[in-house]
Image (cartoon, rainbow, N blue to C red):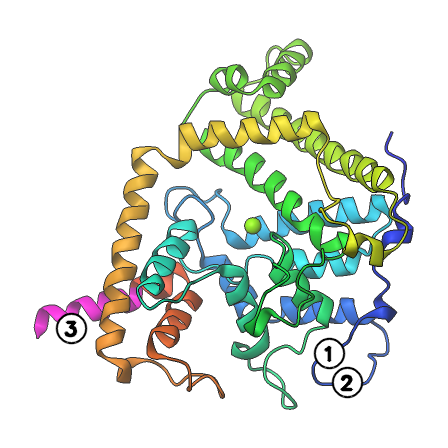
Amino acid sequence: MIRTGVLAQLRFPVERSLGRRFPESLPSFRNDFQRDRDRIVHSRAFRRLEAKTQVFPAGISDHFRNRLTHTLEVAQLARTAARVLGLDEDFTEALALAHDIGHPPFAHSGEVALNRILDRFGDRFEHNVHALRIVESFEHRYAMYPGLNLSFEVREGIVKHSRDLAADTVGMLAEYLPGLRPPLEAQLIDLADEIAYNTADVDDAHEAGFFTLGELGSAVDMAGRLLEEIEGQFPAAEERIQLHELQRRLIDHLMRGLMEGTIAACEGAGVGSVDEVRQHPERLVRFTQAAAETSAALKQFLHARVYHTQLLVEERDHSALAIEKLFGYFLEHPDQLPPGPEGLEGDPLHRRVCDYIASMTDGYFLRIYKQVEAQLTQS
Ligand code: MG
């Protein structure tokens, strides 16, 4: 049994938030983190997650995850861990719901393609930074200010949930306490994300016929052990049901490993406050050794048997090429760009093109791409 609430003294207290960029009166029935969570859910960028690829492109199956359903799975796992550990569940949920809103169309290949293009301009694309630009500038909903005016810690968590900021960070990220770790609530997101995508990708890829359960069982130790247990209990169950049994047991194993590993790391480090978590030289949200091994083995298996297979590689090359072409088109036809949000018109052209393309859903991208292609073949 995992001891509950043992990290409550490390919970980030909402009343200690450094607050919003534009001060607002306190809401009457929600605290600031609950309010931030609700703002994220009501944003356009959040709704666009529905039409962005997670791993498998839309159209092959109605049951594959897209970036929205993936996000909901991350939120559910992260909230569970936060509640058990005694951390702030609302803060965790807000960060989980925001964690992928900066993703461009076409999953990882979209990010790689944009980064490669920006590199030619001595610039770079990073989805966490793009997410910050979305919540700070591109969302236009409120009369009083641009963006969503989120609390400092939520903005910090958007930037730092998956990586720390070097102490010498300059520019727009310099205000987010470079050199310090983010609160545990933000650290949780990265591993909850890893549990969610590894187990979901096993499910989706098995459904798509990439491998058999036997192959997964021999490649991933823990999966093999759990499959033996499942076959012993339900020898007549069909493979699909066995897979679901396996998936829930894998999630259970990884989630326990996440919570136990985190408790052990915090106790081992002797941290007693949020400030000490921030000052600690390493992140304290961790897997146990066993869970870390399972997670790494799952990742390795998915790389070998799914992500690098011809079908997905071709799909990715195809989208990367389309992004290159559309990017080139807008560089040559800047008059075709929609008017940018206030204050961003001073950005260089390549950055404005990048922001526009990065904000697109897969579907919107393909519509615009078709129009542009038709226009180019006519002229
Ligand atoms: Mg994610």
Q: Quadrant of the C terminus?
A: bottom left
Q: Please give left or right for residue 179 compared with residue 132 in the image.
A: right
**Real-space Cα distance between discs 1 and 2?**
8 Å
Q: Amino acid at mark 2?
A: Glu
Q: Please give left or right for residue 267 compared with residue 107 in the image.
A: right
Above or below residue 174? Residue 9 is: above
**Real-space Cα distance between discs 2 and 3?**
48 Å
Q: If you read the primary sequence from the N terminus, does the residue marked by circle 1 or circle 3 appear first?
A: 1
Residue 269 on image: x %, y %: 83, 41
Instruction: Give SS at disc 3.
Output: helix
Front-lying residue, 242 or 5 = 5
Tag shown at residue 20: 1
Q: Which residue is mark 3?
A: 375
Tag shown at residue 172: none
Q: Please give left or right for residue 143 compared with residue 202 in the image.
A: right
Residue at the image position 51 percent from the left and 63 percent from the top: 102
Residue 370 on image: x %, y %: 23, 65
Instruction: Give SS at disc 2.
Output: loop
Above or below residue 140? Residue 213 is: above
- Determine the image quadrant of residue 164: bottom right
Magenta stretch: give its range.
Answer: 367-379
Contact flag, marks 1 and 2 (Cβ < 8 Å) = yes
Tag shown at residue 24: 2
